[in-house]
Image: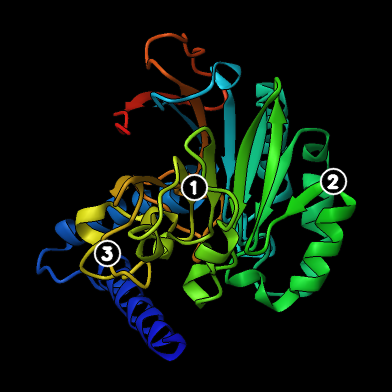
Amino acid sequence: MRVKRRIRQVIVGIVLISAAYLLLIAPPVHRQRDAWGIRLIAGIVLFYGMLIEPNRVKVTRYCVTIPRLPTQLEGLTILQLTDIHWGGIGVNRWRLGRTVRRALAMNPDLVCITGDFIARQPRFVDQVVELLRPLGALHTYAVLGNHDRHAIPELKAALGAADIRVLDNEAVRHSCGGCELAIVGVADPSSSGDRLAEALVGVASSAEVTLLLAHSPDIASALTDQTVDLALTGHTHGVQLPWRIAKTLVRPSRDGRRYAAGWFAVGGSRLYVNRGLGHLWPFRLCCPPEIAEFTLTTNAHTRALSSSSTLFRTRQNTFPSRQK
């Protein structure tokens, strides 16, 4: 599986380099005026995709309707960050620092970080955890991703010291207003390390709300036999390109192109795939980085959502309720 993924990455790289050569160096047109027009348009797109959009972090807000939600959890807010890829090309301290400050200003009830803290190198662990340390003042839970597998002990130790709880095929009960929310975290599904059934032992209850954290939407194959109220994932980066273009080039997860970004119904569960903050290559087009906020409610219209920020654009949505 890993070899096939590398082959796909090489093919995508060759396609992108070839496209850049044709558009910027030798456009396939006869008239020089047309060639310069193509170069100008391609240059603008390249400038925007490399320097502008990767820094336009957007906040997307959703009301998640859970009919059996306990009264104590009405209006509970969950903030999701994912795929920081600290150490990757173009991932910078300014943007991550601003993202953390924004998360603190939103003051959610829970913060969930769904993996890929670093770009493979263990030497980046201390740097990214130091920037994320302020989130330890909130109730913050995390799982690790496929890029983190090269520094699992270091990340667990550093995040734990920053009061960020790492869940590894286990569940915890988070108390809120006298009610308990079950938070389940699994090891990276894209590396086949997840054991969801094992993590859910003793959690399932008709009186309990269950939140699942997993790095990759590959967890969907396990969700067909299990039920959670809300599953939060990342890993795909939304493919970083307009989907109609990207779907012919990229296979974002083990399950293929099915789970690229956004909402999905899997069995009796709801799955959200976050576009992430970082990137595999320093280019995004029509797929900006994302902070996702989820408000739990029994009625999607019972809570007014706040307006957009000047630094972070906001999209307000309601995901249909799942009937029990």
**Point 46% across, 8% down: residue:** 304
Q: Amino acid at mark 3?
A: Arg
Q: Residue furthest right?
A: 161
First reached walking from the N terminus: tag 2 or tag 1: 2
Q: Amino acid at mark 1?
A: Leu
**Point 22% across, 59% down: residue:** 245
Q: Nearer the viewer, residue 231 or 82?
A: 231
Q: Amino acid at mark 2?
A: Asp
Instruction: Give residue 163's mark.
Output: 2
Instruction: Give residue 232's mark.
Output: 1
First reached walking from the N terminus: tag 3 or tag 2: 2
- The residue at which mark 3 appears reads as 257
Say left or right for 260 vs 277: left
**Point 62% across, 64% down: residue:** 169
- Work out how far the residue at label 3 is from the one at label 2, CA to CA, in angstroms: 36 Å
**Point 51% across, 48% down: residue:** 51
- Work out how far the residue at label 2 is from the one at label 1, CA to CA, in angstroms: 21 Å
Q: Dot 2 surroundings within 10 Å: few (below 14), some, or many (20 or more)?
A: some
Kindly indicate whether the residue at mark 2 contacts the one at mark 3 (C-beta within 8 angstroms).
Answer: no
| Count of picture labels | 3
Q: Residue furthest left?
A: 30
Kindly indicate whether the residue at mark 3 contacts the one at mark 1 (C-beta within 8 angstroms).
Answer: no
Q: Dot 3 surroundings within 10 Å: few (below 14), some, or many (20 or more)?
A: some
First reached walking from the N terminus: tag 1 or tag 3: 1
Which SS class for mark 3?
Answer: loop
Q: Dot 1 surroundings within 10 Å: few (below 14), some, or many (20 or more)?
A: many
> Could you tell me residue 300's position as x and y percent?
37, 17
> Could you tell me residue 29's position as x and y percent?
12, 68
